[in-house]
Image: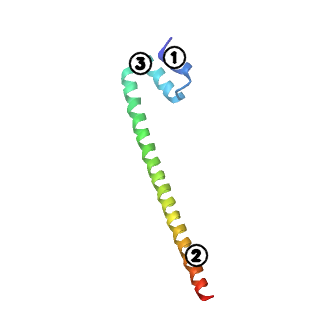
Amino acid sequence: RTLHEVLDASGLFTSDFLEMIASSEISGSVPEMMRHLAEQYQEEAGRKMTMLTRVAGGAVWCAVAAFIIWAIFKLAFIYLNMFDAFQK
C-alpha cells in the first residue's frame, strides 16, 4: 500500500493534504513535500494560536471590566442605602 492510501485509511487528514502526498509520491518528492507541508501547517497553527490568545485576552479584559463595574454599582447602592438610613 502507498503512503497516500495508508493516510487516507486513517481518516485523520484533509483531502488537500492527501492530494499533495499522492502527487509527491508520483513525482518521488515525498520528503520535500512533507517538509513543505510541515512548515505550512506550523505557520497556520501559529496564526490560529495568535488569534486565540487575542480573543482570550479580550474576553478576560471584558470579564475584569464587568466585575469592576459590578463592584462600583454595588458600593454605590450600599452608600446610597446608608445615606437613606441616616435621613430617617
Position in image of residue 75 (x %, y %): 53, 73
Position in image of residue 69 (x %, y %): 52, 68
- Horizontally, residue 86 falls left or right of residue 53, namely right
Q: Quadrant of the C terminus?
A: bottom right
Spatial distance from mark 1 to mark 2, Cα to Cα?
A: 67 Å
Mark 3 element type: helix
Residue flagged by tag 2: what amino acid is it? Answer: Phe
Task: Determine contact: label 1, label 3, CB under 8 Å.
Answer: no
* Circle 2 or circle 3, nearest the eye: 2
- Horizontally, residue 75 falls left or right of residue 29, namely right
Task: Determine contact: label 1, label 2, CB under 8 Å.
Answer: no
Mark 1 element type: helix
Task: Determine contact: label 2, label 3, CB under 8 Å.
Answer: no
Q: Earlier in the sequence, mark 2 or mark 3?
A: 3
- Horizontally, residue 11 falls left or right of residue 34, namely right
Residue flagged by tag 3: what amino acid is it? Answer: Ser
Q: Nearer the viewer, residue 78 or 73?
A: 78
Spatial distance from mark 2 to mark 3, Cα to Cα?
A: 75 Å
Position in image of residue 62 (x %, y %): 50, 60
Spatial distance from mark 1 to mark 3, Cα to Cα?
A: 18 Å
Which residue in the protein does label 1 denote?
6
Marking on residue 77: 2
Q: Which of marks 1 and 2 is nearer the N terminus?
A: 1
Q: In this view, does 86 lie above or below 57?
A: below
Marking on residue 42: none
* Circle 1 or circle 2, nearest the eye: 2
Which residue in the protein does label 3 denote?
27
At x 52%, y 27%, the residue is 13
Residue flagged by tag 1: what amino acid is it? Answer: Val
In the displayed orientation, state which residue is furthest to the bottom: 87
* Badge 3 density bin: few <14, some 14–19, many ≥20, Cα 10 Å: few
* Badge 1 density bin: few <14, some 14–19, many ≥20, Cα 10 Å: few
